[in-house]
Amino acid sequence: MRALPAAMLHDRTLGNKTECLVTNGTGSFASLAINGGLSRKFHGLLIHAAVPPMDRMLTWHGCIERLDGHSLDARCWLSGNDVTGDAGDAGERYLTHFCATPLPTWLYQVGGSLLQKELFMVQGQDTTVIRYTLLSAPTQSVTLNLANYVHFRPAGDHRQKLSAHDIQDWAVHAAQHCVQAMGTSLRLDCQTPGERSHQRCHWLAPCVDQQCHDLLYAIELEDQGYPQRDSSLKIHQADIDLYVGESCYMVGTLAEHCPDGSIEYQRTLTRREQRYHPNDFANDLAHSALQLVADRESVQSKTILAGFPWFGDWGRDTMIALPGMTLVTGQFDIARSILKTFAYYLNGGMLPNKFPDRRGDDLKYNSIDATLWFFWAIQQYIEYSGDWDFVQAELYDDLKDIIHAHQRGTRYGISMADDGLIQGGDSDTQLTWMDVQFDGYAVTPRYGKAVEINALWYNALCFAQQCSDRFEDHASQYQALMRTVKSSFQTLFWNDTLQCLYDCVTPEQTIDDVRCNQIIAVSLPYSPLDPAQQAAVLQVVHQQLYTPVGLRSLSTRHSDYRGQYYGALRERDLAYHQGTVWAWPMGAFIDAVMKVHNDPVLAAQLLTGLKHHFYHEAGIQGVSEVFDGDAPHKARGCFHQAWSVAECLRVVSQYGLEVPD
């Protein structure tokens, strides 16, 4: 159990920017700042996936707690003319302890009373539970007041001021313990299973004049460039006489009946105590990874969510994240389910880059690399499971079809050129993972022949040949093409001047940007580079792109380098792949270190920054999407990103790395 220092909890800026997350396996989640407050519009106690795992709606917004008259509120909640968040009783000063495991847990010291608060969700159900336990008090009991606030809106929206018109269709049904709005019924139930503790609850009819509170989202404007203000409506209050040694449960659910909080608490603890790895860091990473595995209703199968709090499931992200998310934890059934789902949606030799966020939206087939990462994910599945029978029965024909489709040509001009290499796109399309477009402007126009695409293509051909040999499919032979691709790759991409790889070759020019994409040509199971070239590429990447939390997307020596990623969308888009640090390529970097140097001590040392980040920054026990390119490399973007967590977990587990603190 790793507790954060009290000074961090009492620093309002740090407390607002450090977050916790719990999920339920369907795409729904609850998230708060570690000071207990709401510091972004995606924070709340129950954000449910209306069409799992997406179309997320906020319902149970928050709970203002008072202990013997002292507010435990972290001052995100405002009233009257208080627009600064500085007035009144700042409840975080009572915080003495926060830790994320086994559940997000807060300890409050108020006078002589010590109150513990724990947060969890019921798996597979849109239910969030807060457990309060009175650990000690100078008297036999204390009075705990819980004021519950709701706001029925899409998770990514905000409403600076709720009006009477906004809530005209909201209805409270006290006998059923619920409030209804927008076709959704939210039940709130306070449970006091202790022998002595008891509670009194009452519901309030929706009224904006008396019950509406304003909120100030402290980190939204700086990090995302979004408006800071929102509002929420008090709808329910519970007053509990809580005795020392006893617990009470505040339950919010969309289920027809409220579950028993005490029973669900024990089930959640049992599941959280399961160990996937003897290494504590790897084990914590495994539990972090499982929070991003979810059900996809449309295919009645599992998927991987790219990141909380806003991303859905993406083809590229899923294939890169799959080994760490499912194979390291031994969940081969989930891996098979995900691979079969994506194989089912193959079209024109391409995997969908993105599943719809909302019912009725179309699948998007606009990725040149997601399908090639599919080969790598299957290679990793074989490495961990040895299950060749599944690959032969379910996936092998698809792999052959993908290769043939790329040889013939498919969407966006994606095709095999005369030299055997893969080309695709034009100056107006963004098909690689560096895919930002702003107002029609391609920030990183990597069309033509991109370095990682062709490294993945060579690896795919080699694995297809391995399958052909294994399955004695003599009709499918790729040796000649493999030799051609390897020779063409070395001829076209080797930059003898810089002793590394060109990033992209367009019909107009050869682009010598030093980017992290080239490390993939070293890390893959089948590399098109000889050992000396691999070592040279690794050295350049280490010197110019490595940071303690990931690899820069562009060298600091480049004139287009941008060292900070924050502010309005335009500013962030212009920096996203122009120097911003990404955590997920660290997995490929560690693979390259082990391939070239075979030095697990060095590899472990290179991960110390990510380990510190995992336990102490941004989303506690998560790995962020991106970081500033400039030191001190502040965490940015999604605070819990799938491929970031997964790749860190994969290499720590695969190489048995003991990462020092």
Image (spheres, rainbow, N blue to C red):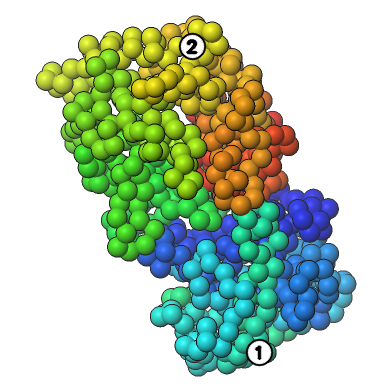
Give the label, 1 or 2, closer to the camera: 2
Q: Where residue 542 sits in the image (x, y, percent)?
A: 61, 20
Location of residue 230 with respect to 554 vertically, above or below = below
Along the viewing direction, whichever of 170 and 462 lies nearer the viewer:
170
Task: Kindly identify the residue that appears in the image at 83 percent across and 74 percent down.
Answer: 88
**Which quadrant of the figure has residue 616?**
top right
Q: Residue at x 65, y 86 (%)?
A: 211
SS state under label 1:
helix
Amino acid type, residue under disc 2 in the picture: Asn
Q: In x, y percent, where is residue 365?
A: 30, 44
- Give the side of residue 278 with respect to residue 213, left or right: left
Quadrant, the C terminus: top right
The tag earlier along the polypeptide, 1 or 2, is 1
Q: Quadrant of residue 351?
A: top left
Residue topped by disc 1 = 209
Taking 109 as reference, is 451 above or below it?
above
Q: Is residue 450 visible?
A: yes
Q: Which residue is mark 2?
A: 495
- Residue at point 82% right, 58% down? 10
Q: Find the residue positioned furthest to the left.
A: 475
Q: Picture coordinates of residue 277 (x, y %)?
A: 53, 38
Disc 1 residue type (three-letter): Asp
Q: Residues within 10 Å of mark 2 (few under 14, many from 20)?
A: some
Residue at image position (22%, 11%) is: 480
Frontmost residue, 364 versus 589: 364
C-alpha separation, residue under disc 1 versus residue under disc 2: 68 Å
Q: Position of residue 578 (x, y in %)?
A: 57, 34
| In the image, residue 229 above or below residue 390 | below
| Residue 199 seen by the camera | no
Q: Nearer the viewer, residue 100 or 222?
A: 222
Give the structural element (helix, strand or loop) at label 2: strand
